[in-house]
Amino acid sequence: MQLVAVDYQADNAEELFVQSLRETGFGVLKNHPIQQSMVSGIYESWQGFFDSEDKHQYLYNKGTQDGFFPQSVSEVAKGFTKKDIKEYYHFYPWGQCPSELRPQLEGYYGQATELAKELLGWIEKHSPDEVSKLYNEPLSNMIKDSDQTLLRVLHYPPLQGDEEPDAIRAAAHEDINLITILPAANEPGLQVQAKDGSWLEVPCDFGNLIVNIGDMLQEASGGYFPSTTHRVINPENADMTKSRISLPLFLHPRPDVKLSDRHTAGSYLQERLRELGVI
Ligand SMILES: O=C(O)CCC(=O)C(=O)O
Ligand SMILES: [Fe+2]
């Protein structure tokens, strides 16, 4: 298995991209329409947010899940016991956000959601007929007017050296949602698990856009598109002193969207959040 960046502007971009999603659960795009200056601007201002004690004024709301999640409540991935070494902020356009940081996130959220709709169109168009007929509505329609799509600003702090031995920045997990759009972070560390169990680096050239399948699209496609396990490993030596910021956008369908005979997006999400221990 190999992950190669696909040129968004190439004639055969759609086919290559969807083939990569089918084979690996991941697709990497270069020359895409998201402005890199926008992403670096967000990394810069949110480093400031995480470095400031004011962040505690934006503690997440338990019922609605918007706001700041300190490291003390950070996720424990399914099947693990140690908390990830990370803190993060959950941004929804309807949710809480420091007012000086809101315009940047809203701008990015809008642009990345538009791109996601286009990519879901590619996925739908290049799904075989027997898979397309499982979709209860067009994939791009599933996220239209959804207030569930979540932009997560993640901060992995520098390592202190006293971390619990098997705690890592993000333990192996799958994403819950339909697809995830993730600009390459400012530091390496993201790895994806190949079918033989080995771990591969995700190409993290600054400017790449990483897209991966989540459990909901795996469910909706009858397993045709795999929701692949990934993780973020700890830096070593000199890199231990560096923070890492990343910005996944988790595209979520409206809760009423029927994913399969077993699940709506709403019932599926509640089940998974309970397993994660965050609700
Ligand atoms: O930080 C990253 O590069 C990936 C984060 C991730 O996989 C997640 O938050 O689900
Ligand atoms: Fe993830």
Image: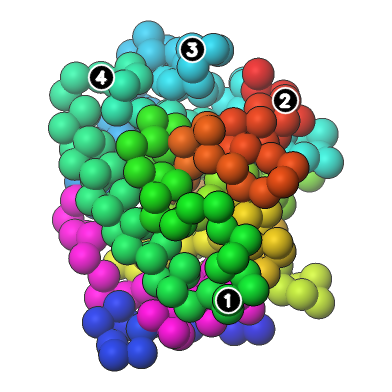
Residue 129 numbered tag = 1
Q: CA distance from mark 1 to mark 4?
A: 46 Å
* Cα–Cα span, label 2 and label 3: 16 Å
User: Residue placed at 50% from the left, 21% from the top?
Assistant: 65
User: Residue at horizontal 22%, vertical 36%?
Assistant: 106
Q: According to the image, label 4 marks what residue?
A: 98
Give the distance between the C-alpha atoms of the residues marked 3 and 1, in whole angstroms: 42 Å
Q: CA distance from mark 3 to mark 4?
A: 15 Å
Report the amino acid beneath label 3.
Asn
Chain part drawn in magenta: 14-38
* Observer-nearest of 112 and 201: 112
> Mark 4: which secondary structure?
loop
Looking at marks 1 and 2 on the same chain, the residue that comes earlier in the sequence is marked by 1
Q: Nearer the viewer, mark 2 or mark 3?
A: 2
Choose between 129 and 172: the one closer to the eye.
129
User: Amino acid under label 2?
Assistant: Arg
Residue sitting farthest toward the top: 57
- Residues at circles 3 and 1 in contact by the CB criterion of under 8 Å: no
Image coordinates for residue 90, horizontal then vertical, percent? 43, 29
Name the quadrant of the C terminus.
top right
Q: Quadrant of the N terminus?
A: bottom right
Disc 2 target residue: 274
Picture layout, residue 110 above or below residue 59? below
Classify mark 3 as within 8 Å of ligand 1 or not, answering yes or no: no
Badges 2 and 3: C-beta atoms under 8 Å apart?
A: no
In this view of the protein, which residue sits in the foreground, 61 or 137? 137
Q: Amino acid at mark 1?
A: Asp
